[in-house]
Amino acid sequence: MHHQIDSLVYLNRLRYLPPSEKLLFTIMLFLLSYLGGRFVQIILIIWLFIWIVVYAGIPWRFYLQLLTIPLGFGMVSLPAIALEIVWSDNLVPINFYFSPSGLIQGAELLLRAITVSSSMYFLLLTTPLIEILEVLAKLGCPSLILELLALMYRFIAILTETASNLLLAQQSRGGYSRRSRIITSLGLLVTQLFKQSLENYRQIVLGLNSRGFTGKLRFWQPIPYKSNLRYTLEALLGYSCLVFYAILKKSG
């Protein structure tokens, strides 16, 4: 999945829009996702689906697959919010039940999580991380934070690829064919993953030093950015309408 995300980030149709505009739009969507009501959040989910799938050209099946990640976490935490425990002196001292207020609160949190995740996916699926870091550097973000973000992203990619290759090799050798082998195979997977991660880290350090790394990462702008008037007008008009509706809803 990580390689597919990287390929879509560099091949989507919104790739040439200025990353500063996309970052600002994402921040504004984040704020509206938290402050807006249920209707605003539903409209945002539909609107972002149009931006990501129709405008950017991201496959809708892949995008829905990404949305199942926050949906799964929300469904797991939903019982903890909606479930009520009541102590009594009856034969059964503990009673469990789902309260209507708890279900409503859980549904609202789940809807907000999907809305915020959709806003995040808009930025992650249309803007490479290097361009995001470049914008943050221009805004005065400390270089230490930028370097940590870049290295963490790189190590996540390395860990994902290494774990996938090791798991495929174990499955081809029947490492998970029986229950007795599952624990052993998982132990070997973790051990080899740790060893190869250290080796990959050493290779990254050697590669940086061989290229004259002086302790500061520099970002290069590979393509010219160009604003699109139609997208800008739609973003401003749509966002203004949603904010206006949210204000009317709060005041009414």
Image: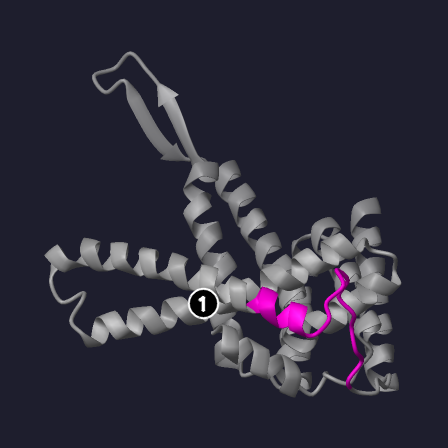
Majority secondary structure of the magenta segment? Answer: loop
- Residue 181 as seen in the image, left or right of residue 113: left
Dot 1 alpha-carbon crowd within 10 angstroms: few under 14, some 14 to 19, many 20 or more: some
Q: The magenta stretch spans which residues?
A: 204-222
Count of numbered badges drawn on the protein: 1
Secondary structure under the numbered disc 1 in the rendered image: helix
In this view, 19 is above or below 27: below
Name the residue that disc number 1 marks.
160
Q: Residue at x 38, y 26 (%)?
A: 85
- Residue 21 as seen in the image, left or right of residue 104: right
* Dot 1 amino acid type: Thr
Which of 133 and 48 lies nearest the eye of the viewer?
A: 133
Can residue 42 be seen in this snapshot? no
> How far across and how far down the image is residue 248, in percent?
83, 53
> How far across and how far down the image is residue 138, in percent?
87, 64
Which of 101 and 73 lies nearest the eye of the viewer?
A: 73
In this view, 100 is above or below 19: above
Which of 75 and 243 lies nearest the eye of the viewer?
A: 75
Rendered image coloring scheme = one colour
> How far across and how far down the image is residue 146, in percent?
73, 59
> How far across and how far down the image is residue 206, in percent?
59, 68
Outermost residue, top side: 89
Q: Residue at x 34, y 30 (%)?
A: 96
Q: Residue at x 69, y 84 (%)?
A: 55
- Residue 211 as seen in the image, left or right of residue 248: left
Can residue 216 be seen in this snapshot? yes
Q: Residue at x 29, y 11 (%)?
A: 89
